[in-house]
Amino acid sequence: MKSRTLLIALCMTAALGMGAQKSAQGGIDAAMLQQISKAGATQGDAALRNAMASNSLEDLARNYRNTTIIDDYFSVETPKQSIHNQRQSGRCWMYSSFNVMRANFAKRHNDTLRVEYSHDYLFFYDQLEKANLMLQGVIDCADKPIDDTRVQFFFHHPINDGGTFCGAADLVEKYGLVPVEVQPETHTAERTAQLRKLLSSKLREFGLELRKMVADKKSTAAVKQRKTKQLGTIYKMLSLALGEPVKQFTYAFRDKNGKTVGEPRTYTPLEFYHATQGDGPINGTFIMAMNDPRRPYYKTYEVEWDRHTYDGHNWCYINLPMEDIAAMAIASLKDGTKLYSSYDVSVQLDRKVGLNALDNFDYGTLFGTTFGMNKADRIATFDSGSTHAMTLTAVDLDKDGKPLKWKVENSWGTESCHKGYNIMTNDWFNGYMFRLVVDKKYVPENILKAAQQKPIMVMPEDPLFGSDD
């Protein structure tokens, strides 16, 4: 019995040894732990430790001087419109895009007419197109091994409900727009997590099947036929969860008081898009600007596979200093035109008052340390990036025309933040604003010329790229 016990002990020791690193120099040994622990909480920190045990870190670090009556005066402000709520979905990009589109419609009609677009309708086609983008991407890369970076990208991110303004432009030009009264929100459109999980699982299954077909030397026509049938399954899932997309409808426009103007008429979604957004395409009328201090300014970049439709536009942007971005935004706002923009919105956001300011929360003092990375460092280390799209609506300028603070229309409902808006100090704006979509009429010639350069291709795995959620 003793020999058996010894044998078991030796086997366990060997097994543990097999899993251990050959060199322990990088581990925490007893002496190192003793040295580390000297930096722990002291007796003098007892009150602070007790406070942290029963209170939120946010409340303890809050700068209460910033919670007084908020300054909501803005020297330049575009006309107000209704605040929407994306609820538990990642469709902020669509809400911000529609905010700009409906504001442009109202501006063309001297604010006498209003229109509200259906997010549910366009979301249906967004998901169908992203499903096709994933499946076709798998086919295009079927000759690569399953652990290839690009193949892994498709299977890791088969579908999502995030996006960008250029994706919205591609979708509305292809599928049109419908009023929200014609196709209202569904429960699933407002709570997308479960549908996204199910669609992702199905797309992974379909992707493996398509890879096998290519490996088995099936014809291109056969692979396409199978993909088409797979997309039929996705279409059915979407139609059950979101409703069948409207093909034709009757609609009469309303004024800002909700009163019907003119006689109702029949539209297709594409006809309604042109009736409310004009005859020409949206693509080609704007530039996408980004502030990325890691890269040279006045260069254009294109993000491979960052699009909504397989036959659409990759996200292409020009990298600019914040001074240029602010100048274009001010020019647009002065002309009454709202802008699509995106931010790392949760950083230093006091939701109780709707203020983004660098000194809202002093976590450094709370923990006796500093958080000293600059914007480039935060981007490079995945500490910060574009997480949420909102609609830039106002700016407050000093006597020299320099921005003091900004205001954005959010898509979290009227009960959120400052009656549905976020107010941002200019310092915070410079540190955590990333993207701006600007009509070309507000863009200086030198920037328009720089935007026409052949783009430098970058990959979607980069810390700053990917969709706004």
Image (spheres, helix red, strand yellow):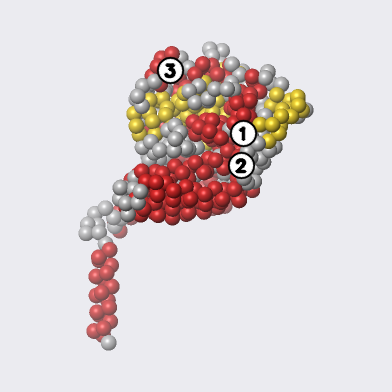
The answer, for residue 142, to whether it is visible in the render is yes
**Quadrant housing residue 256:** top right
Residue 177 locus on image (x, y percent)? 61, 33
Q: State the SS at label 1.
A: helix
Which residue ends up furthest to the left in the rendered image? 22
Residue 59 locus on image (x, y percent)? 57, 43
- Label 1, on which residue? 269
Question: What number of labels is visible?
Answer: 3
Which residue ends up furthest to the bottom in the rendered image? 1
Q: Are circles 1 and 2 on residues that touch, CB within 8 Å?
A: yes
Instruction: Give the residue at x 67% y 19%.
Output: 109
Q: Is residue 400 left or right of residue 33?
A: right
Task: Please state which of residues 11 and 298 is positioned toward the viewer in this rendering.
Answer: 298
In the image, which is nearer the foreground, mark 2 or mark 3?
2
Instruction: Give the residue at x 25% y 74%.
Output: 11
- Label 2, on which residue? 245
Residue 411 locus on image (x, y percent)? 60, 36
At label 2, which amino acid type do we have?
Answer: Pro
- Label 3, on which residue? 448
Task: Please state which of residues 340 and 227 is positioned toward the viewer in this rendering.
Answer: 227
In the image, which is nearer the foreground, mark 3 or mark 1?
1
At label 1, which amino acid type do we have?
Answer: Pro
